[in-house]
Image (cartoon, coloured by chain):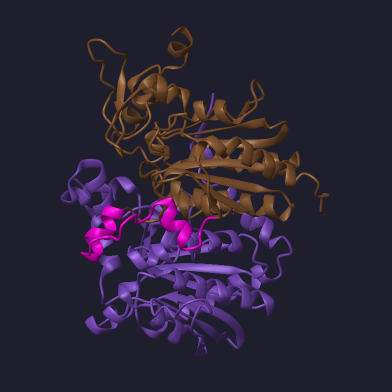
Amino acid sequence: MNNAAYERVKLARDSRRPTGLDYINTIFHGFLEMHGDRRFADDPAVVGGIARLNGTPVTVIAIEKGHTAKERTYRNFGMPHPEGYRKALRLMKQAEKFGRPVICFVDTAGAYCGVGAEERGQGQAIAENLLEMSTLCVPIISILIGEGGSGGALALAAADRVWMMQNAVYSVISPEGCASILWKDSAKAEAAAASLKLTAEDAKSLGVIERILSEDDIGKREFYDRIRILLAEELKELSGDTELTQKRYDRFRRAGTAAVMKE
Amino acid sequence: MALLNFMKPKNRLEEGGRTSAPVQRDSGEPEKKCPNCHRDIPLSRLWANDLVCPCGYHFRMKARQRIQMTADRGSFHELFSDMKSENPLNFPGYNDKIETVRAASCEKEAVICGSALIGRQKCCLFVMEPYFMMGSMGSAVGEKITSLFEYAVKHRLPVIGFTVSGGARMQEGLLSLLQMAKTSAAVRRHSDAGLLYIAVLTDPTTGGVTASFAMEADIILAEPGATVGFAGARVIEQTTKKSLPDGFQKSEFVLKHGFIDSILPRCDQKKCLTELLKMHSGRSPV
């Protein structure tokens, strides 16, 4: 069995990879973090605020995993609670009010599975993001930088442009979860990873993402500079688009239509 | 008995509930064990009562039976019935699985869409099918629901949706995931057109369906005792290593936490939906 796909999964989960905050602090200037969802709490798994991209104010939101054991525990391993998604939405609506583009960095195994998360409406929180993002009047670019775990990732990736780092993965379910449900054996995760078509190349060929970002010099100055230039170029193009929300609708409207057979 | 035979399920898959197949005793008629009160209930009695046990337990129901129960007689006009999913990822075993399910369920996909009259009020209706891969949402389910909301906008109709789903259909990978964003965008357009959307959550409504169109309705109702949640209870137990509170993720729990408007027993559904449709019919178009 070809386990190249599962190798990608392991790479994507590597705690040495740059995290959301690494991207924010290096690509942007003067990041001002904004806390809290104004409903219940502040979720450390989601970081957001305002920063400058080449001088222009933008809203940046990231799912943060942390590097060290202590950081990772504090960030709940990058698994947001509903309040994390609600904070993200609050900041997106604020961006819309002030005409700022939104840039999201996505890195999560998935939305957190817990009693509190269910009590506070994890499903409703994700649904509301999808609903609101579909008509947000400012450009949204989402970059999957590590793990793109299902609805918990999509809730920050219903964007005009979705990019993936070369070794990031994006999937409807974890390979372990898939193997355990389908084959009652989580050890078959390698086979599941290959079947789920979760690599950046797969996502590109399925039309789910627009661009794969090279990981050459990952973590170095050149690496972040490249992303900054690409973001600035793309935002320039999107900012002048008067049919932005129509095109975003069409982008998702197309999804899977080729997989539907009409008799 | 002739009428009852007509109403009886065509095959084993069509019977509601998580219980074993009904037992035929030597003398009496077939019975079914209720998982709530543990009594054996004669099938005829269940069928006469819309698959609700006298104790109040709501058995699962086939989508077509639900349509028959909800829509005015003869008013349901099916739409997009020709759509079904292919195997876009060439996922191993998916072709066989879906063909088996199609043959057993006599349905092509896990949702049935159409227009109907409910209490003489015209509306669009979608009903998900628990006996088709537990209502899992793949490309075709997303496409049908999206198309229905677009149809409803075009014809200025309210949408009533009965949800039941284990979540996104993993065999279609990312394409299933994106159906959450696609259906949500369609719900949003319908909402922005000033039109009414009522969701009735039935057992179980979970995963990607909860995290998209099930939780996006203007009015969200649920059947008694239905499991409504995002993550599966077993997964939560394994992740948190804690036992779950009583009634966790049941519709009564979700009501208490403020995420649904009301719990609606099956016997009251038609009357309530009719009244809600009437109360929203006077609104002038935006």
Q: Quadrant of the C terminus of chain A?
A: top right
Query: What's drawn in magenta, residue-wise?
Result: B233-260
Q: Position of residue B271 (x, y in %)?
A: 63, 37
Camera-nearest residue between B236 and A218: B236
Q: Is residue A226 above or below residue B150?
A: below
Q: Quadrant of the N terminus of chain A?
A: top left
Q: Is residue A242 above or below residue B134?
A: below
Q: Is residue B39 above or below residue B43?
A: below
- Left/right placement of residue A65 relative to residue B136 reads left
- Left/right placement of residue B155 relative to residue B82 reads right
Q: Position of residue B88 (x, y in %)?
A: 42, 39
How many numbered discs, if any?
0
What residue is at 27 percent from the left and 56 percent from the top?
B235
Camera-nearest residue between A131 and B52: B52
Q: Is residue B254 magenta?
A: yes
| Colour chain B appears in | brown
* Residue A167 visible in the snapshot: no
Q: Residue furthest right?
A: B284
What residue is at 31 percent from the left and 33 percent from the top?
B34
Q: Residue furthest top?
A: B2
- Left/right placement of residue B34 relative to residue A49 reads left
* Residue A244 visible in the snapshot: yes
- The chain that appears purple in the image is A
Q: Position of residue B218 (x, y in %)?
A: 63, 54
Camera-nearest residue between A57 and A91: A91
Q: Is residue A196 magenta?
A: no
What residue is at 45 percent from the left and 57 percent from the top?
B254
